[in-house]
Image: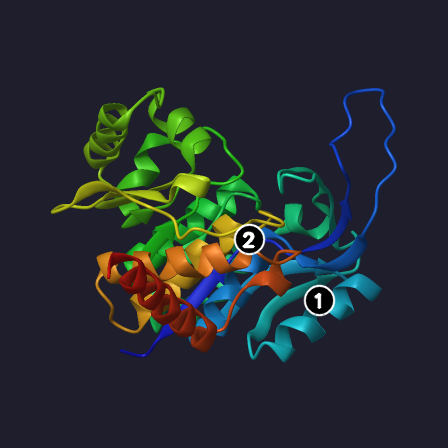
Amino acid sequence: MKNKVVVIGSYNTDMTIKTKKIPSPGETVIGGFFSTGGGGKGANQAIAAARVGADVSFVARVGDDLLGKEAIKRLNEERINTSYVIRDSEVPTGVAFIVVDENAENSIVVASGANARLSTDDIETVNNEISSADIVLVQLESPIESVYAGIKKANEMGATVILNPAPAQELAKHIFQYIDIITPNVVEAEMLTGIKVTDVKSLHMIVNRFFDFGIKNVIITLGSKGYFAGFQNIMEIIPAFKVTPIDTTGAGDVFSGSLAAFLAEGMTIESAARMANAAASISVTRMGAQNAAPKRVEIEKYIASYKAAESEVLN
């Protein structure tokens, strides 16, 4: 395996405020800890994959501004190929304003900026990268025509396609036939299938609906409850690792990015998902999105220590 992952998606500069409660409409609250850092679902996933050890290329647009310059610098520091990150002089780099409450829940507003200008022509420029990729990972913070173009191109060239369908939105049903793995959360799964999650049986129904659409593998992330594995030979809830969360921002991105990296190196989807589950669990114990993504050695040590602790309890 080449261990190569191409991520097509967004880059935002995240501005995060930690506060006791998320304000209601018309309400002002006094916050506490404030930080800025890299974000955007695409960039978060690219960094998560790179920290696991994948050879990552990132396809995106940023502004030709200070934040865009900092974005490329940050991605390069993570050893991500930024040859296909275009600096757009007509619009600013995307920005996300994030409020995190004392229960680690968040509320996010995004100004897309340059992300909204990622074009189908941009996708055409990365044919060589996609043709040599093991995995192509996409999300929905970019223009939908570009997302569809990336999915079809990756499928045509023989890469495994992972769609993280976030933020939640309706999709053309014909696109599902080109997707190998989908990683929705509950809200996204409900929107795409029209089936409400009420119990395990409903999760089975959602997975079967995705199978009917043509998708081969489904992983529904369930937050603190773990994830529902919907594979050809397995349909069950895999529990999350027990942690005390500080900030859940980007946990789904860490899961998808880590999953892509572990699959690219040849793991089975069952093993890759369990490793990604551990990575996401670690990430929620840290503030921020990209800063929270763990390195491979951290994931392996965490799993080993978790198993050891479980063994002591059982004995």
Could you tell me which residue is drawn at 71 percent across and 66 percent down?
71
* Residue at 27% across, 63% down: 311
Position in image of residue 4 (x %, y %): 38, 73
- Front residue of this view, candidates 285 and 310: 310
Up/down of 171 relative to 269, above or below: above
Question: Image check: 159 left or right of 147?
Answer: left
Near mark 2 (Cα within 10 A), the count class, few <14, some 14-19 or many ≥20, is many
Label located before the other in sequence (2 or 1): 1
Q: Is residue 281 left or right of residue 92?
A: left
Relative horizontal placement of residue 49, taking residue 201 as reference (left or right):
right
In x, y percent, where is residue 253? 50, 53
Residue closest to the eye, 294 or 96: 294
The N terminus: image quadrant:
bottom left
Q: Residue at x 73, y 32 (%)?
A: 22
Q: Mark 2 = which residue?
A: 284
Q: Amino acid at mark 2?
A: Val
What residue is shown at x 78% (from left), y 58% (from top)? Answer: 36
Q: Viewed as shown, does residue 136 lie left or right of 98?
A: left
Relative vertical location of residue 40 with respect to residue 168 in this rendering, above or below: below
- Do labels 2 and 1 touch, CB within 8 Å? no
> Element under label 1?
helix
The answer to whether one can see residue 160 in this image is no
- Residue 241 visible in the current orientation: yes
| Viewer-proximal residue among 72 and 227 | 227
Where residue 105 sits: x, y (%)?
A: 62, 38
Determine the secondary structure under disc 2: loop
Q: Which mark is residue 71?
A: 1
Q: Quadrant of residue 13?
A: bottom right
Q: Which callout, 2 or 1, points to the residue nearer the camera?
A: 2
